Image (cartoon, rainbow, N blue to C red):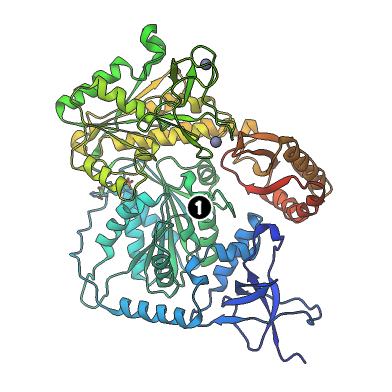
Amino acid sequence: MDEHRRLRVAVEAPQHSGLQTALDYTCERMLSPGTLVRVPLGRREVAGVVWPGEPSNEPSLALKSIAQVLQALPPLSPRWCELVEFAAAYYQRGLGEVALSVLPPELRKLDDAQLANRIARLRKAFDKPVDAIAPAARPELSPDQAAALDRLRELSTPGAAPVVLLHGLTGSGKTEVYLRAAEEALASGRQVLVLVPEINLTPQLEARFAERFGSATDTRERPHRIVSLHSGLTPAQRLKNWLAAHLGLADLVLGTRLAVFAPLPRLGLIVVDEEHDPSYKQQEGARYSARDLAVYRGKLEGACVVLGSATPSLESWQRAEQGRYVRLSLASRIGGGALPAVRLVDMNLLPKATGVTSTLSPQLVAALATRLERGEQSLVFLNRRGYAPVLHCTACGWKSGCPNCSAWRVFHKLDRTLRCHHCGFTQAVPRACPDCGNLDIASIGRGTERLEEQLAASLPGARVARIDADSTKLKGALEAQLSAVHAGDVDVLVGTQMIAKGHDFRRITLVAAVSPDSALFSSDFRAPERLFSLLMQAAGRAGRDAAQAARSEMWVQTWHPLHPLYAALRRHDYIAFAASQLKEREMAGLPPFAHLALLRAEARTAEAAKDFLQAAAELAAQIPGASELLIYPAVPTSVARVANVERMQMLVEASSRGALQRVLTPWMAGLPSLRSHHKAVLRWALDVDPLAI
Ligand code: ADP
Ligand code: ZN
Ligand code: ZN
C-alpha cells in the first residue's frame, strides 16, 4: 500500500505550458480540497490549490510530493472551486492559471506562520468595536421600489436563486433597491457581493453602503463590515480585505470584476450595477465576463442575482424577454425629476465656412453661455483625448504616423509631443515636416485638449476644466478635479466618456456630446449599443436635482439627425432602441442570436500570423462537431500592427454555446502542436464571447 496519499493540485502555470488540468502529487496526510499549498513544478516551486476530485490511477513512481501546506488558511469552498473550474473551462484557460490568478498576489509570498499571523491580527481588528456613525435615515420607498422589492422577496424563496434584471433610468432609485435587498440578506446572516464597473465608482458607493450599514442599529447588533476589492488597493490591503471576505468577517464586499471570485462562505445576494458596462469583461489572460460569472455563481451558491442598468446589455435584455431573467422596472425618476430635453444640432446646416472645421456649433456655444450667465454647470464630452488625432504637412502630405504601429500618433499640445496611444512611443513635435522641411504643419481633427481650448476661447470668463486619462494620471488628481466640480469651482467640464459615467453631479444642467457620430457606422456591431448607453447615461448626469431637471438639456451635434438611434434617444426610449437592435442582430446572425469566439494570433509578420490561423482552422475542421461552426477567414485586427507586432484574428460562430464549447476545448488543446511548424508566431489567445470584433 502507498503510505502517501495522492492528491490533485491546480498549479500555477502559464497558459502556454499547455497545462489545462490539475496535476497529481503525494502528501503524507490528508488535505481537504481547497487547501493552499506549494508544490515543485519542473525546477521551480509554485503555488497550488488542492483540487476536488479523484486523482488519476497511473503508477505513482514519478509523483512528487507537496512541499508546503498553508494550513493557517481555511480551505476554499467546493463551490469556489466549481466556479473557477467553470470559468477555466468556459474561457478555455488552464485551471491552475485561473485559480491562482484570482487569488490575492500577496498570498503567494507568505509562509504558513506569516499567514497565521496576518489572520490573527485581522480577527483581532474585527473584534474591536468600530466608531459608530449615526445611522442614516432610510427614505420612504417609492411605489415602484416597493413593488420591485416585494417581487424580489417573493422570488427569493429558500433554494431559489432568481436572476433579476432591474431596469431603471439614472436617478430612478436602483441603488436604494440594492440597499434594501442587501439589508434583508444581511439580516438573515448572509453576505452580499456588490460589483461595480470601475474603481472610480467604488468610493462613492462604498460611502453610501457604509452610511447605511456601517453602524449598529440597535444595541444587540454589531455594525456590518464592508470591505472593497479592486486593483487599486495595495497588495497588503487587498489580501486583508480578501481574507475578511473568506473568513466571513466582512458582511458586504464591494468591488470591480475581480471581486466576482471573492470567496464568501455565506453569500446570499449578488448585485451587478451598470451590468451593461464593458469593463466587466477582462481583456487579458482569462477573458472572463464578471457579469456572466456572477449569474453562474448565483446558481451555484443559491444566491439571488440583481443586474441593474438604465440601458441593459442586449444579452440580458433578451434573456428577460425570454423569461429567463425576471424583469423589474423603475419607471420614473425619484422626486419626479423630468429627463433632460434632447436637442440635436444638425451639423449639415452650419454655414460651410465654419461647418467642417469648427467643433462647436454656434447654437451650442449660445446654450453654454446662457448656463454660464445663470451660474449653472455644463458638461461637454468627446471621446478622444489629446489635442488633435493627427498632424500633417500641407505641402507633401506627411502625417504623424507611429513607426511601430499602424496608427497615427496623437498631437498633445500642452507638452508639444506626438504620442502613440497604442505603444506609448512619444517624441517632441518636429519644428518642420520631417519629409520635406515645410514649416506649415497643421493638425487635423480634435481631441479634448483642443476642445478645452476652443471652449475657453468661445466663453470668455468661463472656468473650464478637463478630465480625461491625461489629466488624471497623478494619484489623487481625479478626486481633486471632481471635488472642484462639486464645489462649484468649474463652469464647463470637458472630458472623455470617463466623466459621463456614474458621477453624481448635482449642478449640471447641460450635457453635450460634441461628435458622437462615428459609432453609428463602426465596423464593431456593438458600437451603437455602447453609444446609446453612453448618451443615456450622460443625459442622466443632467438635472439629477429635481429643482433643475425641468431646465436640463442634452445636446448632440450630429451629421445624421434622422438616425433611429437619435430618435430613440430623444424619447429616452431604451425599450424601442433595444427592440430595433435585437431585430437587426437577429437578421445579421449576431449575438445574442449567435455565439462567438475570436482567436487572435501575433507574429512579426502578417503572413506568419495568417498562416498560423489558417492551420488552426484546418485543425478545427477535423474535430467532431466542427460542421456546426462557421469559421471565418483570418483578418487583421482594427489596429493591425502595435509595437512592431502584427495581429490577426479569426472569428468562430455557432448557434449555441454548447456547439461552440464542444469544439473549442479539443481545439485549444491541439494548438500547441502547430507551434513547431509556425515558429514565427509569438502568441495566440482565444476570446470567448468577445465584446468587439
Ligand atoms: P439610481 O441608482 O437608479 O441612479 P439612486 O438610488 O441613486 O438611483 O437614487 C437617486 C437619488 O434619489 C439618490 O439621491 C437617492 O438617495 C434618492 N432616493 C432613492 N430612493 C428614494 C426614495 N424612495 N425616497 C427619496 N429619495 C430616494
Ligand atoms: Zn512635408
Ligand atoms: Zn505605436
Identity of the residue furthest to the right in this view = 622
Q: Name above or below for residue 283 compared with residue 194.
A: above
432 vs 529: above or below: above
Q: Residue furthest left?
A: 374
Give the position of the N terminus as an image quadrant. bottom right
Which residue lies at the image location 59% right of the left edge and 39% below the top edge?
Answer: 643
Residue drawn 54% across and 25% down?
521
Left/right of residue 355 with respect to residue 600 in the rendered view: left
Horizontal and vertical percent for residue 218? 21, 73
Which residue is rendered at x = 58% and y = 77% of the image?
37
Picture coordinates of residue 311, whole percent (x, y): 43, 40
Q: Secondary structure at mark 1?
A: helix
Taking the spot 53% from the left edge, 28% from the top edge, the residue there is: 408
Residue in front for this viewpoint, 544 or 616: 616
Seen from the viewer's position, the closer of residues 206 and 138 is 206
x, y percentage for residue 265? 46, 72
Residue type (three-letter) at the residue carrying disc 1: Arg
Does 119 sit above or below residue 483? below
Q: In this picture, is 193 found above or below 644?
A: below
Residue at label 1?
291
Judge: label 1 CB < 8 Å from ligand 1.
Answer: no
Image-quadrant location for residue 238: bottom left
Q: Is residue 334 left or right of residue 647?
A: left
Q: Residues within 10 Å of mark 1 (few under 14, many from 20)?
A: many
